[in-house]
Amino acid sequence: MSLDAITLSVIQAALQQTCDEMDLTFSRAAFSPVIAEANDRSDGIYSAVDGALIAQGSQGLPVFVGVMQYSTKTIIEMIADGRCLAPEEGDIYIVNDPYLGGTHLMDVRFAMPVWRDGKIFCWLSNTGHWPDIGGSVPGGFSASATAVEQEGLRLPPVKLFKKGRLDPEIYAIITSNIRVADQRIGDIRAQAAALHVGQDRLFAILDRYGDETVVAAIAELRRRAAEQMRANIAAMPDGIYRSKAFVDSDGVVDEPLTIALAIEKKGDGLTFDFSGSSKPCAGPMNSVLATTLSSVYLAMRHIFPDVPISAGAFEPLDVIRPEGTFLDAKYPRPVSGCAAEVSQRIAEAVFAAMVQALPDKVTAAPAGSSGNFALGGHDPARGRDFVMYQISGGGYGGNAGGDGLSNGCSTIGISKSPPVEIMEQAYPILYRRYALREGSGGAGKHRGGFGLAYEVELLRGEARASFVMDHGRVGPQGALGGQDGAVNSVTVWRDGKAHVPKHLSKEQDIPLKAGDRVAVGTPGGGGYGDPAQRDPALVRRDVAMGYYTPEQAARMFGAAASDVDGTPMKGA
């Protein structure tokens, strides 16, 4: 079938808008602040044949781009070989098993077949981060877990909704294994509603343009995405580009983990080889294969944002399966840190390698940590338990065009920190401080952006704090002579005494009582280019704005800061 450019463009936009409306519905209807306010969720449309990505919402987490297509593919395969019940109209499957095309257990995926004339036309799927999924600690981020069972309830693909009705038995199993169970129905209903909105919008597109035309458009969009990615790659010089990135520790063994990457560019394709990376680890910083692959894809999306989101965009990218490393976790390896932390270090390794070939397109390393902070306890004033989950922004890396963004969202998505006012309303806490972390941006011709500094006080009752963060040992990498950004920092104040976790950014089950506080400083982005080449006027501006002290500026920027005396620049 021949498609004119206008029709193709309109259908592409309509599919994208369908996913955007699903995202919006999910956030607006969800109960948990991590979904409703932080937007830690994603929605997409997937092939009925192989689960390949057709379209995803522009406001969804990029790390879920690859993950949900592998998850959907797994469901299709399990239905085909009888390991999963065959679908009927109105069914919605739930799954969070990391080893079946997932991330960590808290990322719960729904998948719904869309029926057309008695056949499955496509699948709609979404992922939402539930604030608790059971396990040994509130929030699921067990920093010292040594098996996945310690991290929470693991669900294979099962029908949570059967012919449009919530299955009370499956629902009872879920709520019997998680904390604050009575609150999850709001997120479940929101997640299902988003899929139904997507189905309605998709039917409208099919009714208007015809099934055959839409199928042809989807195939053409996939072909063009692959073609566009190949054209971008072909413009790179051939060669092998190497890099390394490091995870502080696995939370159990206090030694760094290495991500060793070699990218071979040949013709119009790229091959990614992680075979020199560390072996599987004891703690929760293992990454399942789907997350590892998706991390590579999202990094390339950062580099070539003009390529449409489609499975075709990934076809020129060959990732050699990193068997025998912590980037290809098998059951029962714990994985709670894979999506939120290891994925970002994989992306950092991709950036560090690709900046050698494309210095004008690739940035220095961003903060690279979601800052996972979970606080669970009992609120005596409201007479109920709570589980609070906090994610945090950090600095982006400097780039050829300018300085990095300050307090930007994590590398893996558009999720933002929930508003302070919402968190204080929902939980028995008070933010004593919430500000940019001055001095945290790595020095460079174009400096890194600044991280976030915040301090939370527990107002009443008792609670337990857990952290799974990273970049506490080594800061985000600078590029082309730029300096690293500041490391992540965590300090817990109990009875007025400071406690710093042994693993710097990872610890679990820290008991808190009213008046105790948690202070976090998120990483700044890496600097780009020689710091001595920074425009002295920009150095003076940064000092005048309080971003760096005169002493910091002199130490970090050298010759570029030689005339800085701390006197505010006029107009600053």
Image: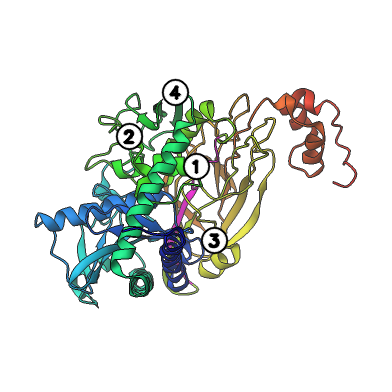
| Mark 1: few/some/many CA within 10 Å (<14, 14-19, 20+) | some
Asked if the magenta segment contains residue 374, the reply would be: yes
Query: Which residue is at the front of the view, 312 or 495?
Result: 312
Give the alpha-carbon distance from disc 2 to disc 1, as whole Å.
Answer: 18 Å
Give the alpha-carbon distance from disc 3 to disc 2, as whole Å.
Answer: 35 Å
Which of label 1 and label 3 is nearer to you? 1
Q: What element carries label 3?
A: loop
Q: Which residue is denoted by mark 2 in the rendering?
A: 319
Q: Is mark 4 on a helix, strand or loop?
A: loop
For image coordinates 88% across by 47% down, the residue present is: 571
Pointers 4 and 2 in contact (C-beta within 8 Å) = no
Q: Which residue is denoted by mark 3 in the rendering?
A: 418
Q: Which residue is denoted by mark 4 in the rendering?
A: 238
| For residue 412, above or below residue 387 | above
Pointers 1 and 3 in contact (C-beta within 8 Å) = no
For badge 1, the amino acid type reads: Phe
Give the alpha-carbon distance from disc 4 to disc 2, as whole Å.
Answer: 17 Å
Which stretch appears magenta?
Answer: 365-380
